[in-house]
Image (tube, rainbow, N blue to C red):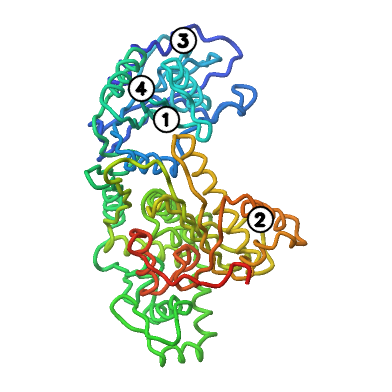
Amino acid sequence: MQDEINKLIKYKVFSIIDKPPNTKIITTRFVNTYKPYDIKGKFFKSRLVVQGHKMTAFEDYDPRNIYSPVIDLSSLRTLLLIAAKLNLKCHMLDVESAYLNSDIDKPVLVYPPKELKIEKNKVWMLHKSLYGLPTSSRNWYNELKSILTNIGLVQNEIDAGIFQIINAHETLIIGVYVDDLILLSKDEKTLKWFREELEKKLEIKYFEEITTYLGLTITNDEKEIRINQNAMVRELLKRENISENNISNLPSFVREEDEDEIISEENRLVLRIQNLKDQINDNKQFSFGNSKITDTEIKDLKIDKEKIDEIIQKLNDNKLSKEDTTRYQSIVGSMLWISRNSRPDISFSTNQLGSKCANPSQLDMLRARKALGYLYINPELELKFAKDKGEQDKHCQIEIFVDASYAPMSDKKSVTGYAIFVNQDLLSWSTKKQTKVTKSAFESELVALNSALTEAEFITKLLKSLGLTVGKIKVWEDNNAVISTCYQDNLGHKQRSIDIDLRIIQKKLDTGEIEINRIDSIDNIADTFTKQLGQLGFDKMKGALLNRKEYNFRVNVKSNND
């Protein structure tokens, strides 16, 4: 706490004035946090925070001027991919007390925290940004942007969280996430120059080769750059007391051997079968933990369907307490961050859990814990970006696998899933409920295809803006009607929103930006983002996601116009 007070004085954050009459005064407080894996070495932190929620929009601040750009997650992976492809050095730095470096455009009056005693009828007038002020993040971003552009960097036109110098003599790319900066360059001289220029304006903590960034562990060796969140996964499992008693081979399964008291022995068997109803493929036996579901049990399921549905409905009706709801939301929030950064294998299950955050049931909590059980036996998966051998090639090839699940939920909205590879390294993926209700599988697949192409277009533009070239995008689609219609530019659709999606895709085909190829559903990698696959299918697709170079599938030789 004393360290924070010293910083407030050092940066001249406030001045003490007489309390003016009839003026809103905002309260402040110290917030103490503990970060067990902080690379900066400060595990215990104390920050003075303004209780900005008590401020009134348009009266105390302009709500239209509070957005602060940060580097997009797929952009961060794109930078790491570029670093691997061009063999760039990757460093990082942290700006000390970042917000305290930025001025505020309108003075704010606050009461000092109760730990600091001042004279009666005295208040603080703030001159610098503090955590909690609605405009602080924007003020800091503008300050940093001004410093970087004055040094000579140019803001990237595609991602506002990236700044760059790229010419024939030097390459310097900066990714900004609030006060954490990732630096990419060909040589040490450029990095040293940038560090010295920045130290003239800011107090920074500089790290050489990057090892962690935003909770990601990053390894850079001679062959590849690897990213994982193993430490965060282990911390989450420890926090939720997940052990070998909770293990699950699939992220969306609830095991028969579950030990939660809210499920009776009878209900456990019901859940065991219920979670396999959609996993049955050609009446084969299915692995479920260490057990098997047989054809006989499947027939029994059909006989007792009404009873099973009644029990499942009862579990869904039993909502969690306020305390357990908060715990459930915390679990899902952690899993979302993990799945969006480095774990595509839990993308679908996490998306399904996230849809229940507002009012989760006991059944939802069981599914969340069993997703954690999957992470328990699969805690250490990595994404890899291979380095080019010999002379660096600046050409990139983008490949998309896309799929949709038509109206699987009660609200009848379909699910979009896609995986985007650059030079056969996984760069972006998504599981997302579609915002519009579609009337057929054809329409849902068309919406999914357009969503995937939108993300691929962003990646293409970003790569080009950073000095690389991109070839024709190869798309793998398993719906024959979608492929045929997209290649027939004389065809349209009666529904306006669907027709717009179709026209956008047809234009990209006409200009040669993309090509759409047929793939069998059983080989479509995106299938794992739209539904929970059985054990064999899930393992196959997980392997393809993490090692596309070794994934081979049968290419449909029919014409796209057939």
Q: Nearer the viewer, residue 442 or 408?
A: 442
The Cα–Cα distance between marks 2 and 4, rounded to whole angstroms, is 50 Å
- Mark 1 vs 4, N-terminal side: 4
Q: What residue type is disc 4 on?
A: Ser
Q: Quadrant of residue 559?
A: bottom right
User: For residue 491, what is the image quadrant?
Assistant: bottom right
**Tag on residue 506?**
2
Question: For residue 178, which numbered disc appears in the image?
Answer: 1
The spot of residue 545 in percent (x, y) is 38, 60
Q: Residue furthest front?
A: 391
Residue at horizontal 40 percent and vertical 18 percent from the top: 100
In the rendered structure, which disc, 3 or 2, sits on the residue that comes first in sequence? 3
Q: Nearer the viewer, mark 1 or mark 4?
A: 1
Q: Residue at x 40, y 74 (%)?
A: 534
Q: Is 48 drawn above or below residue 6 in the view shown? A: below
User: Is residue 173 shown above or below 464?
Assistant: above
Residue 473 place in picture, x, y as percent? 51, 53
Which of the numbered marks, if any, corresponds to residue 97? 4
User: Of marks 1 and 2, which one's residue comes earlier in the chain?
Assistant: 1
- Is disc 2 in contact with disc 4, using a CB cutoff of under 8 Å? no
What is the CA distance from the residue labelled 1 to the residue labelled 4? 11 Å
Identify whether 277 is placed above or below 66: below
Nearer to me, 317 or 373: 373
Residue 154 position, x and y percent, is 47, 24
Comparing labels 3 and 2, the label whose residue is closer to the camera: 2
Reply above or below: 361 against 25.
Answer: below
Instruction: Determine which residue is flagged by label 3.
Output: 122
Q: Residue at x 39, y 30 (%)?
A: 173
- 233 to the left or right of 299: left
SS label for mark 4? loop
